[in-house]
Amino acid sequence: MEGNVKTQEFCCSKEGFRVSKVNIVDRQRAHTPVTRTGCKARVLVTTTNSNDQWVISKSYQKHNHALCTPAMTPFMHSNRVVSKADIDEATTLKEVGVGTSQVMNYLTQQAGGYHNVGFIHKDLYNALQRGKVKEIVDGNVNALIAYFDYKKHDDREFFMTYSVDESGVLYNLIWSDSTSRSDYTYFGDVIVFDTTYKYNLYGRPIMPIVGVNHHHNTIVFATAIIADETSQSFEWVLQNFLEAMMNKSPISVVTDGDRAMQRAIKSVIPYAKHILYYWHLSRNAQANIGDLKFTAVFSKYMVSWWTTEEFDIQWRSVVSEFNVQKHPLVIDKGNTRHLWAQAYLSGHFFANIRSTQRCESINASLAIALKHKKTYLDVVRAIEDGISRMRMNELKADYLSSIRSPPDHKTGRP
């Protein structure tokens, strides 16, 4: 979770009322019972500034409904837990062909009744299903690591590293082959991160790290599959990316404006100049303010070659003209104009890649290539196939360039 939570409210499970829905005569499923009664019982806790301890600041204990009887409390959702011992025993029984219902009956008899078992049939079923999913994920990860080991044997300069969480599940992953690492040596002054592409591979976003070569064609330096979009994950990616690239820091970094990414850049590569995509800025302006004229003027001001003093005057003028001085987006963009206004970016090298076309083309290819991929290994190989096609196109570009510019017969030079 990003940010620091200072206050948390705990409400009764019967708080509020169920949203009313249209009563359809031909409804196939019966309405579930109404359980919410608008109960106002709640506890408010806040954290102290001195030692970060949580204290109860408000408490209202009066319920407007009958409370659960002691005999029924074991069946409350918050009290139902399937222990690891129960899961292990149930798994053993399932492996020899015993059905889930029979397993539940057996565990209930062992515990001396339903009120002692600690969970219901649905809880046991869900726990066994989670175990199956983890087994599949672990198997996929093992296959992926074996594939990367093969790649390292074939490509001595192949780089791959990953991290796992406290339960041993794959967390973050980054890889780069020898060609990509060599490309970074020559063309790694400007790198581009795009965190907008989401691919539902166990909920993991895929993040290509790209740049441009001497033909201004997009090249991929590395690819990461991350657990989440927090500063911690982005810092992990940047730190290991630098390790893969012999600690050569880029001169400039172009991103989509993700705040967690901005914090990671400041932490890991503080001397790199950071700027934002044009396209994301224009899209956000239109989505939040909804005025095409303002968006057009805003887009024009982003690329105008003014001095910083001229830009500030023009910016105040247009903000006043459209009466958006108090709009949160306008306030934010005004405070961060050093990240997007050309007036504040003069003299910095960005290899002419301030638009998102570099990453969008890759994202479009990813969306197609990964549409039916179900495992980590399938995804990695699809990404590698896409990178291979990009390199083939680059070879074609080199060949066509040599045809258009034949060498001089006297000097032998193009």
Image (tube, grey):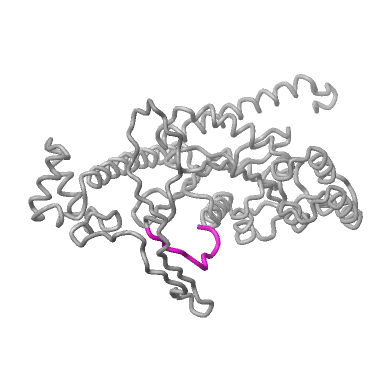
Q: Position of residue 270 (x, y in %)?
A: 66, 60
Outermost residue toward the top in this view: 403
Is 25 left, or right, of 160 in this rendering?
left
Viewer-proximal residue, 149 or 54?
54
Residue 257 location (% of width, % of height):
66, 49
Judge from the rendering whether residue 100 lies leftward or rightward of residue 405; answer left or right: left
Residue 14 x %, y %: 37, 55
Screen quadrant of the C terminus: top right
> Which quadrant of the view contains residue 27?
top left
User: Looking at the image, can residue 159 be seen?
Assistant: no
**Residue drawn at (61%, 25%) of the image:** 392
In the rendered image, is residue 152 in sight? yes
Q: Is residue 2 magenta?
A: yes
Q: Is residue 82 magenta?
A: no
Q: Tally the numbered discs.
A: 0
Q: Nearer the viewer, residue 203 or 174?
A: 203
Q: Quadrant of residue 45?
A: bottom left
**Residue farthest along the bottom direction in this orientation:** 50
Residue 23 lies, in percent from the top left, at 42, 33
Rendered residue at 62%/50% (across/down):
258
Residue drawn at (40%, 59%) of the image:
39
Image-based side of 44 in relation to 281, left or right: left
Magenta extent: 1-12
Who is closer to the viewer here, 334 or 221?
Answer: 334
Q: Is residue 96 left or right of residue 133?
A: left
Nearest the viewer among 94 and 114 is: 114
